[in-house]
Amino acid sequence: MAFITVTRIDRPFSTSADVLCRGKRSLAVNPKISSGREVLKKLIAQADVLIDPFRPGVMERLGLGPTVFLGSKDEGKKGLSERLIYARLAG
């Protein structure tokens, strides 16, 4: 039986008592600073699935867009994690 670990990335200094957080590991990371982006790159590169909750273009501006992890066939670039499932929830 495989165990699933869900890691939720929260804003620093946020307190979330949301019932949807139950059973998830939560980390506070600031993606707007370089050290925060590096932490996120390492976490995402090891993940199986990433659900991008931001407006289109936000992850790209942070340097965490799909081409960073999945690569680009057009440019012949390899990504950090080509097995990653990168999902967008644009509402």
Image (cartoon, rainbow, N blue to C red):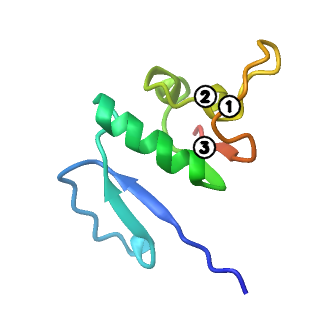
- Residue at position x 47%, y 62% in the image: 7
Judged left or right of residue 66, residue 35 is left
Q: Quadrant of the N terminus?
A: bottom right
- CA gap between label 2 and label 1 equals 5 Å
| Residue for badge 1 | 79
Judged left or right of residue 84, residue 25 is left
Q: Are marks 2 and 1 in contact (CB under 8 Å)?
A: yes
Residue type indicated by callout 3: Leu
Q: Earlier in the sequence, mark 2 or mark 1?
A: 2
| Residue for badge 3 | 89
Q: Residue 3 appears in which quarter of the rendering?
A: bottom right
| Residue for badge 2 | 68
Q: How many marks?
A: 3
The crowding category of the residue bearing disc 2, from other C-alpha atoms within 10 Å (few below 14, some 14 to 19, many at least 20), is some
Q: Quadrant of the C terminus?
A: top right
Relative to the observer, which residue lies in front, 61 or 70?
70
Residue type indicated by callout 2: Val
